[in-house]
Amino acid sequence: MRSPMLTLLAFMTAGSAGFSTVPDDRPFITRQGDQLMEGETPFRFFGLCASTLNMNKEQILPDWSNRWPDEFEMRSTLDHLRRLGARATRVGIGLSIASPKDPGAQVHVTARRTYNEEAFRALDRLLALAREYDIRIIFPFIASQSFKNTRGVDEFAALAGQPPGAFWTDSGVKEDFKHLLSFVLNRRNTVNGRLYKDDSTILAWQLGNEFDSYAPDRGFKPADWTGAIRDWSLEMAAHLKAEAPRHLVMEAGGVDHAALIADPHIDILSAHLYEYWARFKGEPWDLAPVARERREALRGIKPLVVDELGLASYANLRALLETIRETGISGGLLWGLRGHRRDGGWYYHNEGGTPVNSYHPPGFPAGHAYEERRTLDLLRKEAWAIRGRPVPPIDQPTGTPELLPLADGFTWRGCAGASAYRIERAPTADGPWQVLATGLHDSVIADVKAHEAAGASATPVLWHDELAAPGETWFYRLQAYNETGATPWSPVIPRTAQPPLPPR
């Protein structure tokens, strides 16, 4: 088992410079008219949604041991965001809810008014680390959807024995949800001792995820649910403000925008802008004009954040990001980043069966079909431009990689900022060393849709030593590098070559 101290030291070595400890008196983000403010300065940002910061959803091992991100996974993801110039991210789509449909699943809410301490300790760690990297968090409480192993509003109502739809109307279920809100807001972080409601790392609490999709996802008439969802949203926004008056409240992609704009307890309006889903629904899919229209409706009134965007051509994305920056929209978050895995490689996710998969900075050939590297380079440029600052030089990769034997080959724990890796071997632990491969990548899955459909949970083998004869013992080491520099070599590991495994 890897020592926690080794994990920490890996992030304190070469490449970890570039961010500083955030002072205790860092201001909360506030709103002033239609702007977000950090003290006396407008707070504007580009970044990515990073749903695995709070809870791993894909490639979950059968024993659920990688459900909650560890420090390595969180630090790597936060460092990737920092490198891209992000000052904020949105975590997940909501807390996970127990359901009989997911036997054995590890979740945040395990029963009515009962919460998983291990899950919330992971959230404690995230908030403490995000503060260190000076990245603010948008945190949505619950999904309107019923995604596997996450679930949402209908499953929450079921914990109280209530039918689907009761989440919005049943007084007992609403009190259960207020209990959850109060539990979270008044929780004392076990890592840094801060009450959540007193932590300026939170940019905004978001009521949930895509409440406007609740009715259409279930084949209901949206008009039949608008009033109930609106009234629920206003009631919960008031409860949030009463419990955490220093934090901002963000609506949930909601319904009855006029009521949400007028409500004094809702500070930020959100928008999800996707070319693919707009085309699917027969809606306007040229995203820049849509963003401009949303902004004009709020100009001088409240801030707008495009908290999900993407599934679009590069040209459409570029025009959208430029429009967000030029019109004064407070920020935009590309969907979505999946991070490094503790047992090697990356987590992967295909977005709705589209050609677009999750993003893995700084971008790799496996993502060529959706222009991963080009898109991330654009996002980095715009993330600095929206702050009125020049794009800084790229840092060399952070820390030191860790080479891991896997099956008849190897995988490794990667480094944030690494564009490639090189591997060497020697007959003894002291050398002499021979370069066996350069230009190796740890993001290697291109057909993520098929990968997920196969129920993949284990990390793939990333490299084989085809020159080693079965029974020979060699010593190996790994180095990460990018266009700026390289990391120290990984700890040396011995490996006795095995015969190739039979095909599966």
Image (cartoon, grey):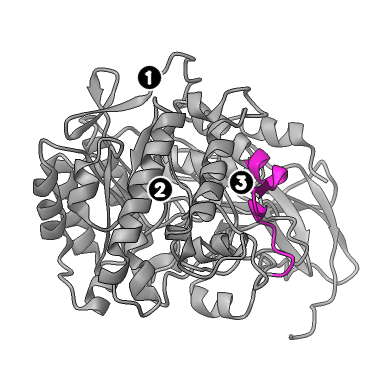
Q: Which residue does the image show at 61% across and 46% down from the upper left?
A: 73
Q: How many labels does the image show?
A: 3
Horizontal side of residue 131 vs 310, given as left or right: right
Measured in 3D between alpha carbons, the distance from the residue under mark 1 to the one under mark 2, in whole angstroms, is 23 Å
Nearer the N terminus, badge 3 or badge 1?
1
Q: In this view, does 248 lie to the left or right of 477?
A: left
| Viewer-side residue, 358 vs 261 | 261
The answer to if 389 sits in the magenta stretch is no
Residue 233 is left or right of residue 466, and the answer is left
Determine which residue is flagged by label 3.
73
Residue at left offset 42%, top offset 37%: 239
Vertical comparison of 391 with 149: above or below: above
Q: In this view, does 332 lie above or below 192?
A: below
Whether residue 312 is visible: yes
N-terminal of the pair, mark 1 or mark 2, is 1
Q: Is residue 172 above or below residue 355?
A: above
Label 2 neighbour load within 10 Å: few <14, some 14-19, many 20+? many
Label 3: element kind: helix
Residue on which the image places disc 2: 207
Quadrant where the C terminus sits is bottom right
Q: Are discs 3 and 2 less than 8 Å apart at CB?
A: no
Q: Name the residue under label 1.
A: 27
The secondary structure type at the circle numbered 2 is loop
Q: Is residue 112 magenta?
A: yes
Q: How many residues crowd mark 1 within 10 Å: few (<14), some (14–19), many (20+)?
A: some
Q: Do the residues labelled 1 and 2 touch (CB within 8 Å)?
A: no
Please provide the residue range marked out in magenta: 103-122
- The type of residue carrying mark 2 is Leu
Between residue 210 and residue 412, name the one nearer to us.
Answer: 210
Q: Determine whether 400 is above or below 16 in the image.
A: below
Q: Residue furthest bottom?
A: 503
